[in-house]
Image (cartoon, rainbow, N blue to C red):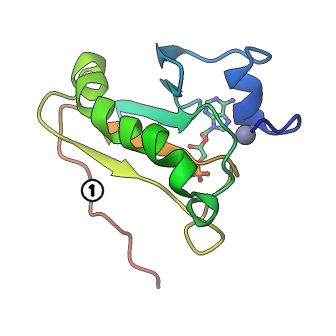
Amino acid sequence: MNDPNCIFCKIVRGEIPAKKIHDDAEVIAFHDIRPQAPVHFLVIPKAHVATLYDAGPEHVAALGKMLAIAGRLAREAGAAEGFRTIINTGPVGHQEVYHVHMHVLGGPDPLGPMLSRKR
Ligand code: AMP
Ligand code: ZN
């Protein structure tokens, strides 16, 4: 449920600071510390789930809520004309933090292509 060494669990527990924009019983959302777009925040389940490979029926409510609140939070953060959601999983997906998180990226201008081509 809660991993003592996980950086996002520490944010959930309030042990390290984050610019939170949402907090309820199941999920929190906070601004990414290294934004890659004018709007860039993360939505995470409060329960520790390392990757989407580890998600199961017990996580359906939190994972569903992450999607269900993304639009409102994006609009409130300034992305009113669209945004992109990304969940990176494992080494192939370049996942850096092993606590499931959904990136929400947007801004006034259109984003770049969905994937940069590998050379
Ligand atoms: P990913 O590559 O999908 O695992 O992305 C991890 C994201 O977490 C990156 O965009 C980081 O900038 C972000 N991140 C790491 N530590 C923090 C933190 N303490 N507060 C907010 N965002 C963070
Ligand atoms: Zn965690």
Q: Position of residue 51 (x, y in %)?
A: 63, 58
Q: Position of residue 71 (x, y in %)?
A: 23, 32
Q: Position of residue 85 (x, y in %)?
A: 34, 48
Q: Quadrant of residue 38?
A: top left
Which residue is tagged 1?
112
Q: Quadrant of residue 63?
A: top left
**Would you say 17 lies left or right of 31 here?**
right
Note whether ligand 1 is within 8 Å of mark 1. Answer: no
Residue 36 in view here: no
On screen, 48 above or below 93?
above
**Would you say 8 lies left or right of 24 here?**
right
**Would you say 18 lies left or right of 27 here?**
right
Q: Nearer the viewer, residue 67 or 112?
A: 67
Q: Quadrant of ligand 2?
A: top right
Q: Nearer the viewer, residue 52 or 35?
A: 52
* Residue density around tag 1, few if under 14, some if 14–19, many if 20 or more, within 10 Å: few
- The residue shown at (37%, 43%) is 64
Q: Nearer the viewer, residue 105 or 36?
A: 105
Q: Quadrant of residue 9?
A: top right
Q: Residue furthest right?
A: 4
Q: Amino acid at mark 1?
A: Gly
- The residue shown at (53%, 20%) is 25
Q: Secondary structure at mark 1?
A: loop
Q: Position of residue 73 (x, y in %)?
A: 31, 23
Q: Residue furthest front?
A: 57
| Quadrant of the rendering where the N terminus is positioned | top right
